[in-house]
Amino acid sequence: MIASTNDKNCVVKPVALNKLQLCLAVIAVLITAFAGLVFGPADLGMRAVIQELLNRLPLVDFDSGLSSRQQAILFEIRLPRVVLGLLVGSMLATAGGAYQGVFRNPLADPYLLGVAAGAGFGATLAIVSGIGDGLGFLDPVPLAAFAGALIAVALTYTVGSGRGRLDQVTSLVLAGVAVASFFTAVQTFVQQRESETIRQVYFFVLGQLRTAGWDEVTLLAPYTLICITVIFLARRHLDVLTVGDEEAGSLGLNVRRMRLVIVVAASLGTAASVAVSGLIGFVGVIVPHAIRLIFGSSYRVIIPLTIFFGGAFLVIADLVARLILQPAEIPIGVVTAFLGAPFFVVVLRTAWKN
Amino acid sequence: MKAIDCKNVSVTLGGYEVLKGIDLEVEVGGWTTIVGPNGAGKSTLIRATGGIIKSSGNIKIIDKNVQDLKHRELAKFVAVVSQKPIIPMGMRVMDYVLLGRISHLGFFESEGERDVETVVLSLESLDASHLSDRFVGTLSGGEKQRVVVARALAQSSPVLLLDEPTTALDMGHQQETLELINQLRVERNLTVLATMHDLTLAGRYSEHLAMLVGGKIVAEGSAEEVLTESLVSSHYGARVKVIDDKDGPIVVPLPS
């Protein structure tokens, strides 16, 4: 048998995601997604939702009793919104986990290198200039946000990657601070000059899954799937990076290249998410840390679980955002912090006791 | 055949020339220890030889140019145990030693049975199998050192570079670690280049010594040739007495 044994003759295997953890993660996604479909201002009924979903399978035909309007609510409003929540939540949480690994910094979130500030600036410019008004078919806000986010990260990477006295990690993080401050300053300046659009900008900054339809989902899905796959494949390398750049290099890892690959994947995915859903904070910090505290510190476990729980967390947060003041909605960014912070404190306290 | 061949190696760090034209050769299966006072450039020489930092001149490991090799290829030829390894607190010994296998895997690959087997054997050969399930952060200094060496062994590379492998250890553990490394060197025909502060210990375990002072090698040869009263006292600024013993010279500090 290939495994080492210790004094008590018990087998020690390398850390890996086990089936129970994976089952838990899948169940969390299924339950939250189902809740996201069932609950909302219009009462559809749990049973009818199940029957309608089953009807989508071949050779199944139930009479759910839902009217065509109710079916449209289910399939054209709630389902895309749940799927969008899963995609954005997964992406932000996974990107956060990846950033924490690549920068060996527990406070790193997907916005560390200026994605948020860049996106905020791009979106504000688009909103203020009103270039999309009347176009209808093409909303320039997400495009501008996406472009702004990528420009900010590219700038951070260019400024922070020189070979100097600082190590690459410190220098990138500092460059990120500088770039983010600059973009935030310019954004605030533009926003203040055009005060009548301040409300729209404010909504973007607090994040929303509200306008979700299938268009946003099809726009976002390819980015999310590719970026998450790249980070998933790099999970082993994130573990290697925990021993520092120098040792990781002598173990055979091309640290700079691997860092670039992971940062590009995490930033691209984050930029795409932000473009569609605005700046949803906290998911990228809370979810990977909660998983780390509960399931251990190996990225082989953290990354796959974060992909699932990140999505589930955002769907729950969105549900709360929809229901708490219904029929009005509160920005989802408020909910992620409001739910996330106390939950995180509980996990942290429990981890201390253990 | 030479396992390590340094020719005219110089390293400049932060505008200061730390190594100045080093020539050093180590035969396959040999053990050479670099001794020298603090700041002589010992660690820099290890890091340059391991390809961790850039150097001018020429460094060959088993006839391959270090500067030409990619990270992964280099790690298959040479394993480095650094002076102060970073210990990831929440990682278990099994997973820590498994990091040594990364150079044998492609981007899409994950560790297979062969890699786990190599790790198990590495831990076994360092008498550390019982630590497999412990967290690296909870180990004692001696245990930690053995686990770090086990990770280097798991790389399955023929050349081992050890930067102060015994500094943090008490006398018993120093002996134990060096014995184990020596045993492995003989069994697996490994080549060892180490740095050490304890001169007597360095003389006992290495076949060849090189004294590095101010970035230059000032003396080289057997322990008897390098560990002389005049060389040690002049270059270390220390008052010492060297006692000839049949197993090698004993360097004793003298009070004023």
Image: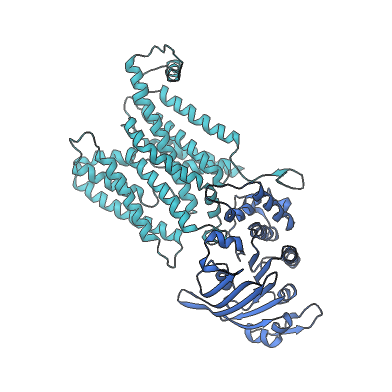
Chain colours: A cyan, B blue
The quadrant holding residue A127 is top left
Pick whichever, B20 or B118, lies toward us: B118
The quadrant holding residue A156 is bottom left
Rendered location of residue A3, percent (x, y): 70, 46
Tell me the residue at 60%/33% (across/down): A20
B193 sits to left or right of A204: right
Rendered location of residue A333, percent (x, y): 37, 38
Tell me the residue at 33%/56% (across/down): A155
Pick whichever, A346 or A95, lies toward us: A95
Q: In this view, does B191 lie above or below A341?
A: below
Q: In this view, does A73 lie above or below A65?
A: below
B164 sits to left or right of A239: right
Rendered location of residue A279, percent (x, y): 35, 42
Rendered location of residue B241, percent (x, y): 74, 84
A269 sits to left or right of B249: left
Q: Is residue A306 above or below residue A165?
A: above
Work out whether residue A288 can be spotted.
Answer: yes
